[in-house]
Image (spheres, rainbow, N blue to C red):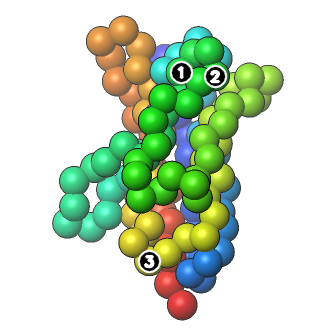
């Protein structure tokens, strides 16, 4: 059974940083296409960043490119999202996603709030 558990969210001031983690079980992160999404209140869920099975970075949302970095820890079977220079527009629930064949798996999400 696939399970994705996110952590690392919280309240941070503009300009601050956070590091999100997504621990995967029931799959091998190193051979799985995985993504971070976010969903702000009243807005559609949007992809933020992706990492493929070879460790290549497939995608960054334009508004986060240069500020966010996706990475993977194969030993911990975990993907991370390092977020720097956060601004209020980054406030959202951040969700981890895994693609296995035609199946999509989601974590429960972690709240990120950027506010002074």
Dot 2 alpha-carbon crowd within 10 angstroms: few under 14, some 14 to 19, many 20 or more? some
Q: Nearer the viewer, residue 54 or 27?
A: 54
Dot 1 alpha-carbon crowd within 10 angstroms: few under 14, some 14 to 19, many 20 or more? some
| Residue 30 locus on image (x, y percent) | 64, 17
Dot 3 alpha-carbon crowd within 10 angstroms: few under 14, some 14 to 19, many 20 or more? some
Residue at figure coordinates x 57%, y 55% from the top left: 66
| Residue 102 locus on image (x, y percent) | 30, 12
Residue underneath mark 1:
52
| Residue 21 locus on image (x, y percent) | 64, 45
Residue 71 located left or right of residue 65: right
Tell me the number on the disc at residue 113.
none
Label located before the other in sequence (3 or 2): 2
Residue at figure coordinates x 60%, y 41% from the top left: 70
**Does 39 sit above or below residue 12?**
above
Residue underneath mark 3:
88
Tell me the number on the disc at residue 55.
2
Residue at figure coordinates x 48%, y 56% from the top left: 64
Residue 39 located left or right of residue 86: left
- Check if mark 1's residue and mark 2's residue have beta carbons within 8 Å: yes
């Amino acid at each position: 059974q696939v399970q994705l558990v996110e952590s690392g969210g919280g309240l941070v001031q503009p300009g601050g940083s956070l590091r999100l983690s997504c621990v995967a079980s029931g799959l091998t992160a190193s051979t799985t296409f995985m993504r971070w999404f976010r969903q702000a209140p009243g807005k559609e869920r949007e992809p933020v960043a992706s990492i493929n099975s070879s460790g290549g970075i497939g995608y960054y949302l334009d508004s986060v490119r240069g500020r966010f970095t996706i990475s993977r820890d194969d030993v911990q079977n975990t993907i991370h999202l390092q977020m720097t220079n956060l601004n209020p527009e980054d406030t959202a629930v951040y969700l981890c996603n895994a693609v296995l064949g035609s199946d999509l798996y989601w974590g429960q999400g972690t709240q990120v709030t950027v506010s002074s």
